[in-house]
Image: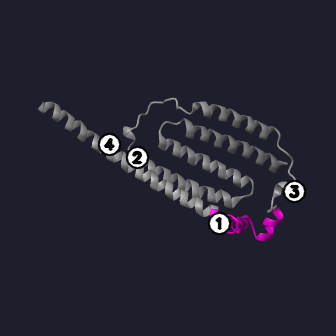
Amino acid sequence: MTDNLAEVIAFWYLAFMAVTGGVGVLALRNPVHSALSLVYVIFHVAGLFVILGAGFLAVVQIIVYAGAIVVLFLFTLMMLDMRGIAHERFVHRQLWLAVPLAVLLAIEAVFVGVGTPEVREAFLGAFPPQTISDLGGSTQAIAAVLFSEYLLPFEVASVLLLVAAIGAIILARRFDRELEAMPEAAEAGESGEAAS
């Protein structure tokens, strides 16, 4: 009973902190602060994986997301010149779509939270705890699925991340060239007016 109570308290603490970090990702104006808030979320989600007994996923969550993806985000942000971007808040044109979707998501979260079903054999899938134990642990079970059934989606995801990084670098370079060309165009206009 004590272990179960400790797990419940740890779950609610980690879940609450992850949600507050997610709100920080959306609410903070500085993109670097948002990325650091995302790291905060990732560490607390990793704690949730530890509670679920998926230590491998917790470590992968920290190494891959906090150690690689967020660093990639920060690297891309550092390449962008944020001084030329307006910092005032504005109402996005897609607000009409975002608000109903947010309401639907909130209703779904309440529905899932209130109507939690009992765990049945059908919910355990192809890898119930006994099968995972027979394979030698969660790491071996994930490897068996990842590098057999899901090899192609795994490789496609890595290519998509690479394409996104290259696209961000190209956009940053184009933005820098446009900023460099702006003073030259302004000087050319002033010199033309002076000559006339």
Asked if 14 appears above or below 159 in the picture, the reply is: above
Q: In the image, which disc is placed on residue 168?
A: none
Which residue shows up at 82% across the image and 57% down it?
Answer: 124
Q: Earlier in the sequence, mark 2 or mark 3?
A: 2
Numbered disc 2: secondary structure = loop
Give the prevailing secondary structure in the magenta stretch. Answer: helix
In magenta, the rendered stretch is 129-152
The answer to which image quadrant residue 15 occupies is top right
Quickly name the residue at label 1.
151
The answer to which image quadrant residue 142 occupies is bottom right
Query: What is the crowding at mark 4: few (fewer than 14 residues within 10 Å), some, or many (at least 20)?
Result: few
Quickly name the residue at label 2.
80
Q: CA distance from mark 2 to mark 3?
A: 51 Å
Which residue shows up at 81% across the image and 59% down it?
Answer: 125
Mark 1 residue type: Leu
- The magenta stretch spans residue 136: yes
Query: What is the crowding at mark 2: few (fewer than 14 residues within 10 Å), some, or many (at least 20)?
Result: some
